[in-house]
Image: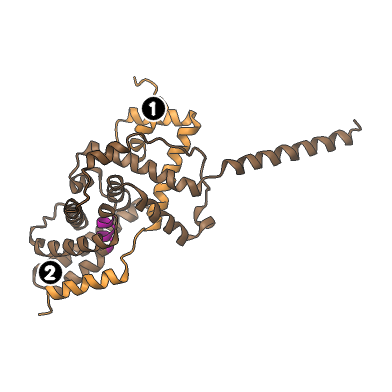
């Protein structure tokens, strides 16, 4: 499956490169195809950095304008999606820094230093059957939106968009070790949040244990009676 | 020879296990720990489950109105020849 996905990605990149060539040759329709192909990815990235749809929309528009203007500078040593994701992250970060209530990241990070897991129970093995695809989709979106932005942007670039740690760090203007430590925390927070819904409740475990013990007792009593004691 | 790690060190290095990063020795030490530690094992397993669920969920669609405004703006800036 990994190979299949990779070859799918490679094909996607070939399509992208052909479209880029056509845009550079003056075909405006080809740019529209590129936008259609990637608007969702760009929106996810700008939303991850900015946290609200209004700002994400503006940054998405800026991203495609910049991409169009700088398309001639796209070097084919990276995938087109990686290049575009970098522009999207930049556009969103610029927008964030222009906000009046912008909090420098180091302070936001310090506030969350003490993060420890609280849920230690295993999860239901078939969440899609239990909750349905749509509900699960909603839960995931809510969990991502609830992450503090410094973890959200890292988590989305790395674990949703599938950039490498190096690519994601570069896109977000971070050093790789900083990216990795934020990613770990983001992952733990996501796990924690979904655990609230997906874990096998300790009370259920206890209930099962209780009923097993009661059943055991009943069986034992019956056996005792059967042997006449 | 790597000394044994405590639970918080194991959790701090969990991404190496998930992403296949770091030395083979480190990953082996992590594996040995989670084989014997129920709590860490659950955290590793459920983090893996979480990542699978997130990938399958394909979160965040572009709202229709947002998409329409994007095409509108691009249309204005790059009009049909």
**Residue found at x 9% / y 67%:** A24
Residue B29's tag is 1
Q: Chain of mark 2?
A: A
Instruction: Give the residue at the far front of this rendering.
Output: A100
Instruction: Give the residue at the far bottom of this rendering.
Output: B81
* Main SS, magenta residues: helix
Where's residue A218, x and y in %?
A: 79, 39
Where's residue A186, x and y in %?
A: 34, 43
Is residue A99 visible in this depiction of the protein?
Answer: yes
User: Where does the magenta region start and end?
Assistant: A40-47
**Residue found at x 33% / y 30%:** B24
Answer left or right for A106 relative to A65.
right
Q: Give the colour in which the image draws chain A.
A: brown
Q: Quadrant of residue A170?
A: top left
Answer left or right for A172 relative to B11.
left
Q: Is residue A48 above or below residue A68?
A: above
**Residue found at x 39% / y 24%:** B5
Answer left or right for A9 relative to A120.
left
Helix, strand or loop at label 2? It is: helix
> Where is the C terminus of chain A found, in terms of image quarters?
top right
Report which residue position mark 2 lands on: A23
């Amino acid at each position: 499956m990994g190979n299949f996905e990779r070859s799918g990605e490679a094909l996607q990149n070939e399509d992208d490169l052909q479209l880029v060539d056509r845009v550079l040759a003056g075909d405006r329709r080809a740019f529209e195809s590129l936008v259609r192909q990637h608007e969702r990815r760009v929106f996810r990235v700008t939303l991850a950095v900015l946290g609200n749809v209004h700002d994400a929309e503006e940054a998405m528009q800026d991203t495609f304008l910049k991409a169009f203007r700088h398309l001639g500078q796209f070097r084919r040593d990276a995938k087109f999606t990686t290049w575009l994701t970098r522009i999207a992250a930049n556009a969103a970060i610029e927008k964030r820094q222009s906000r009046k209530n912008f909090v420098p990241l180091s302070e936001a990070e310090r506030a969350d230093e003490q993060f420890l897991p609280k849920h230690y129970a295993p999860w239901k093995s078939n969440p899609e059957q239990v909750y349905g695809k749509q509900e699960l989709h909603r839960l995931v979106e809510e969990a991502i939106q609830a992450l503090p932005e410094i973890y959200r942007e890292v988590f989305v670039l790395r674990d949703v968009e599938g950039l490498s740690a190096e690519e994601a760090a570069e896109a977000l203007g971070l050093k790789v070790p900083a990216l990795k430590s934020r990613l770990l925390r983001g992952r733990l927070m996501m796990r924690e949040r979904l655990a609230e819904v997906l874990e096998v409740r300790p009370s259920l475990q206890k209930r099962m244990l209780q009923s097993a013990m009661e059943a055991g007792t009943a069986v034992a009593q019956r056996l005792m009676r059967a042997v006449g004691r | 020879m790597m000394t044994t790690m405590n639970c918080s060190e194991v959790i701090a290095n969990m991404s190496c296990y998930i992403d296949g990063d770091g030395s083979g020795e480190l990953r082996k030490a992590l594996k040995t720990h989670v084989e014997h530690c129920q709590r860490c094992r659950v955290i590793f397993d459920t983090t893996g489950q979480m990542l699978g669920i997130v990938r399958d969920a394909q979160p965040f669609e572009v709202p229709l109105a947002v998409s329409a405004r994007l095409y509108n703006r691009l249309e204005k800036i790059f009009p049909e020849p």
